[in-house]
Image (tube, rainbow, N blue to C red):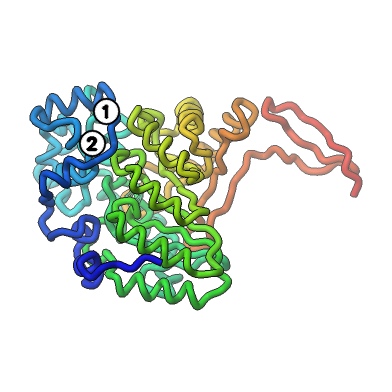
Amino acid sequence: MNELLPEECEPPLVQDLSSSELVLGTNSTKKQSYTEAELLNSDFDVISESSKYFRNTYFPNVPDKKWSSWKWQIQNSYTSFNELSKVLDISSISDDDDFLTKAKKLPLRITPYYASLFEGKPTNYALIKSVVPSKLEFIVSEGEEEDPLHEEKMCPTENLVHRYPDRVLMLSTGFCSVYCRYCTRSRMVSKDQKSYSFKVWEKSLQYIRNTPTIRDIVISGGDPLTLPDKQLDYLLSELRAIPHVEIIRLGTKVPMVLPQRITHNLVNMIKKYHPVFMSVHVTHPDEFTPEVKEACTRIANAGIVMGSQTVLLQGVNDEVGIMKDLMHKALMSRIKPYYIYQCDPIPGSSHFRTPVSKGLEIIQGLRGFTSGYAIPHFVIDAPGGGGKIPLLPEYYQGREGDYVVMKNFEGKTYKYYDPE
Ligand code: SF4
């Protein structure tokens, strides 16, 4: 088991520190400062032509090594409309002062790498919509609530959600490298008071140690891959030392929005704790750049099995063609399509929510028209804490005597002999 040296946990883990401190372990300023050496020691070495163009345009003095450092990417992330306006024409998004004042309360964080994907695109571009605040977030609709899955009612400790009998969700940090506009946990991500101290982690570890029925741990947040290697190593080692913990899963969007974080050091550290799985949050086929493919290759080559998680979003990915392309690109990057989620009813999310029939239409448009491996489950995480409920198009039509009647992917009817 790994021990954290005092200087590695104090700060950040012993005290209740802000999310920026927790992720970076340095100080509380929004723009973190690092030594040149820290910013130049990344082993990530893939930069696509479009990233180079963006870097040369907006950061002309930044060398490849720095651009490819995840710490540099976090240090130079866009966190306000003012900063974003340097790289994006935001006039149509923020065309009134009232909105700009109110928008200061909305979390905003976008890595320069992810912003490079916006270059030359209109403001209604899918990836822009998914991470740039909009006025529509101030419209609260029927059924929306801060904690729609009632996770906070299922917390035996401050950062542990115990909803299913044999598994728990551990919220490791409130920090993410990019803040998605539709985040289920927007009540806690980006909120400084929702960063977790070492003592909070320890209480949760103790709960898991004392609960032998728990065999599966999902570490999420926030994004656990924004934690420094040492802290993640510590957490994984403590979990792996618990005899009844069988599998560990990391829920993350980092490979898609900050692929530079996937260093050889990181994956070599994680693979010490196998079996470790990774649920990768993917949104749109345009996310699969050469950088992302390199990150996924490193993860897969370390034996970490990846599954995709996608939130179905109106105007972003709610077309069969886009979803099929996304699932194919995920598979080609060795991520098995796993879940498409109906967008959870958090406050101000109705502009993203599609009718449930859209999800069924997408599954129907995939099943039979592409490899079975490319087909995820479409689920609704039941409001009120009912858990994930899978929905399927109506292939099963009922019974006729000793036969089951079914419709195939082309809508043709077939009967299967199945005496009662
Ligand atoms: S990466 Fe995940 S936890 Fe972070 S803001 Fe996006 S959806 Fe929320």
Q: Picture coordinates of residue 307 (x, y %)?
A: 50, 43
Residue at horizontal 23 percent and vertical 70 percent from the top: 6
Q: Is the distance from the Cβ of mark 1 to the nearest ligand 1 atom less than 8 Å?
A: no
Q: Is the CB–ligand 1 distance for label 2 below 8 Å? A: no
User: Which residue is drawn at the image coordinates 48% and 74% (left, top)?
Assistant: 209
In the depicted view, which residue is nearer to us: 227 or 252? 227
Is residue 213 found left or right of 45 in the rendered image?
A: right
Image quarter hosting the N terminus = bottom left
- Between 19 and 241, the one lying in front of the other is 241
Q: Which mark is residue 103?
A: none
Q: Is residue 100 left or right of residue 404?
A: left
Residue named by callout 1? 47
Mark 1 Cα-neighbour bin, 10 Å: few <14, some 14–19, many ≥20: many
Q: Name the kind of residue labelled 2 in the image.
A: Ser
Labels 2 & 1 near each other (Cβ < 8 A): yes
Q: Is residue 206 visible?
A: yes
When the figure is inspected, residue 410 is found, relative to residue 82, above or below; the finding is above
* Secondary element type, mark 2: loop
Give the answer, above or below, for where 374 lies relative to 148.
above
Q: Residue at x 12, y 49 (%)?
A: 34
Label 2 neighbour load within 10 Å: few <14, some 14-19, many 20+: many
Quick check: 242 left or right of 96?
right
Q: Amino acid at mark 1?
A: Ile
Residue denoted by label 2: 68
Q: Quadrant of residue 244?
A: bottom right
- Can residue 133 be seen here? The reply is no
Please give the name of the residue rendered at 29% of the width and 70% of the height, measured from the top-left corner: 198
- The local secondary structure at tag 1 comes to loop
